[in-house]
Image (spheres, rainbow, N blue to C red):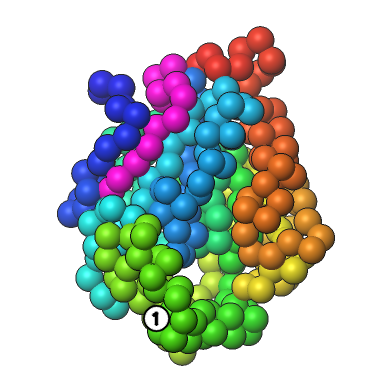
Amino acid sequence: MPSLNPEGFLRVGAYDLEYRMIGPPPADAPTIVMLHEGLGCAALWGEFPDRLQAATGAGVLVYSRAGYGASTPVKLPRPLDYMQVEALEILPELLDRAGFRRGLLLGHSDGASIAAIYAGGVQDHRLRGVAMIAPHFVVEDISVASIAQIRKDYETSGLRAKLQRWHRDVDNAFYGWNSAWLDPKFRNWDISDYLAYIRVPVAIVQGAADQYGTLRQIEIASEECYCPVEVTILPGTGHSPHREAPDAVLDTISEFAGRILFSDQGSRGQAV
């Protein structure tokens, strides 16, 4: 397939998904595919993807899932298994359309959970590793409490106006995520079974002061994974370590990616 343009849309099923391709295309180098959090989008990664590309020499693909950024909105309410649907139905087609040949997934929060489901559920030979920032494998009380609070903030403070800058349909983005997590039936959501089927190295970055999850998530990964799991816990850091401690996260992820994706420094930036 032809090389990706630096930015544009990929048609996946019924959705047009916006993307940015930073650095070499998948045909020319390994690719790091970044999956955003529950209120994120491609643009909300800020400069982190560009810095990651510069640090690794890999191509970096960021995209907005349906309902986020400039991508097609989704029908609400989202199904409670929306992350499984994303990982097992949407992401495989997106990677194919992007021309993904070899690389790793890097996800934050919901995106990290989607990456874990994909790695355990698809068994893609092209995938060489998974990096997760603040992942969720089960629902905790702290998660529900913080998500209930952010709904109040969205409806009573300036949060909606701030998010509106980033999303084509801000209510679609917010309530699609928030209503699913606050549904009482969602308390039974548990993706830990997928972890036992991951066959590639895993790196997890977790803020010690994460307001959406505790170190129990790390314990679950350590208990369930048979693959190597490297854990970096950042003290005094909340749910978005790549924003709160970007240098530390960049160092951790770029070292992991370089070691996993490139056989030696001389091959950096070249497909192998």
Query: Is 261 left or right of 182, judged from the image as shown?
Result: right
Say what amino acid the circle numbered 1 marks.
Answer: Ser
Tell me residue 15's x, y (percent).
Answer: 21, 53
Question: Can see residue 196?
Answer: no
Q: Is residue 31 magenta?
A: no
Drawn side of residue 248 relative to residue 93, left or right: right
Q: Give the position of the N terminus as an image quadrant.
A: top left
How far across and how far down the image is residue 150, in percent? Answer: 51, 79
Q: How many marks?
A: 1
Q: Which secondary structure, mark 1?
A: helix
Residue lying furthest top: 266
Q: Work out which residue is located at the far left of the displayed protein and give it.
A: 14
Task: Tell which residue pokes out farthest to the bottom in this image.
Answer: 184
Residue at 46 percent of width and 64 percent of height = 38
- Whole-percent x, y for residue 47 in the image: 53, 41
The answer to whether residue 21 is magenta is yes
